[in-house]
Image (tube, grey):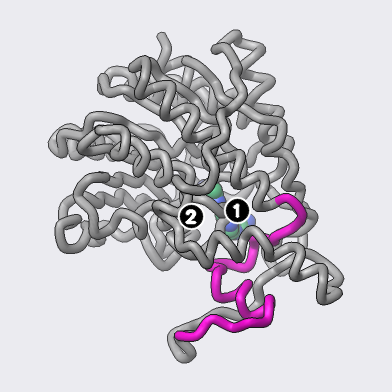
Amino acid sequence: MITFHSEATKLRRALTELNEGLLVAPFECPERVDLVLGRVREVGLSEVRSPTRYGLEPVLAVHDACYVEFLASCWEEWKAIGMAGEAIPNIWPSRSMPGRRIPEHIEGRLGYYAQTGETSICANTFEAADISKDIALSALVHTLKTGEPSFGLCRPPGHHASSDQFGGYCFFNNAAIAADQALKHGRSRVAVLDVDFHHGNGTQEIFYARDDVIFVSLHGDPLHCFPYYLGHANETGSGRGEGFNHNYPMPPGTDYAKWSTALDDGLARIRESGAELLIVSLGVDTFERDPISSFKLASEDYLDMGRRLAGFGLPTVFLLEGGYAVEEIGINVVNVLSGFDE
Ligand code: SP5
Ligand code: ZN
């Protein structure tokens, strides 16, 4: 295993997250990176390398150009008109007001490009998202070249980011960008397996009508859990993509015995698809003491998860998504990776 990491992921340090009606210190904080990296070093998991820079072309292959431009300039524009705090969206195009024209005012553009209100845009958000996707691409390229597994210590995470909207702490969809580039490097089908507690709505949206990327997500049932409006079992893809999207929604309280049954089923779908590469959207917010989630996985379960993924036998790239019980995030992430390496 090799780890890709950059200190620059910590440049985004938002002050606010709207949670339970209060502005709190964000769960998705830079300290997460230190905890995971600290554990990688503590157990001697792997060499730690800096990412290569890949520019915006791979981003523009999956994200809308005006969305990328918005992310690049949002914070400066927000400050320029004298807004007092962080850029927090508070109005959106909605069912009764679909929003076919993009507003000029930054407040209107902010809502247009936002899915959710919990994620504030602050200084260096774009820069951190840009390096996060470079970490993902560096991990991908390493695995494509060597066949060896790799771990991208991505931050901010990516799986909620859709082609033209940020949300759920995500700005660029690292896994989607990597999957798309794997195809451009000659793979004909790639799998994204999303084990984060939350449905990977962005990844699903990006590949929904495509058959070259199979998306499998195990997550809290959207009837009860964020992101609420996508992730049901009957969302199976559209057009040529029909049969290449598989959701495994599970109720709050789900433990590893039940969760791992869904994992095995999802892996069987990936096997049938003939995918040549596995990208794992690795969130560990399925942990029993995660502060914003409700599954019941224990630290040792992550070792078994890693072993099962290794047994699957495809070249594998792990990309960090969520996981917020900060003291344990390092242990749980590295347990997956060590289990894989056994
Ligand atoms: C990458 C990732 O894991 N993003 C998750 C974003 C979730 N943000 C909103 C969570 C709202 C949870 N509210 C639960 C309150 C429980 N006390
Ligand atoms: Zn999550």
Whether pointer 1 and pointer 2 mark residues with C-beta atoms closer than 8 Å, the reply is: yes
* Residue located farthest toward the bottom when viewing the structure as drawn: 96
Q: Residue at x 42, y 45 (%)?
A: 177
Residues 3 and 297: in front is: 3
Q: Quadrant of the C terminus?
A: top left
Would you call the spot at circle 2 few (<14 residues within 10 Å), some (14-19), or many (20 or more)? Answer: many
Question: Residue 28, image x and y in percent?
Answer: 66, 46
Q: Residue at x 68, y 76 (%)?
A: 106
**Relative height, residue 9 to residue 82 (above, below):** above
137 on left or right of 35: left
Q: Which residue is mark 1?
A: 169
- Characterize the magenta stretch by its predominant secondary structure: loop
At 52% from the left and 37% from the top, the residue drawn is 54
Q: Which mark is residue 277?
A: none
Which disc, if any, is residue 160? 2
- Magenta range is 100-124
Q: Secondary structure at mark 2?
A: loop
Q: Is residue 287 visible?
A: no
Depth order, front residue of 308/87: 87
Query: Is residue 231 a member of the stretch shown in magenta?
Result: no
**Relative vertical location of residue 153 with respect to residue 163 in this rendering, above or below:** above
Check mark 1 vs ligand 1: CB closer than 8 Å? yes or no.
yes
Rendered image quadrant of residue 272? top left
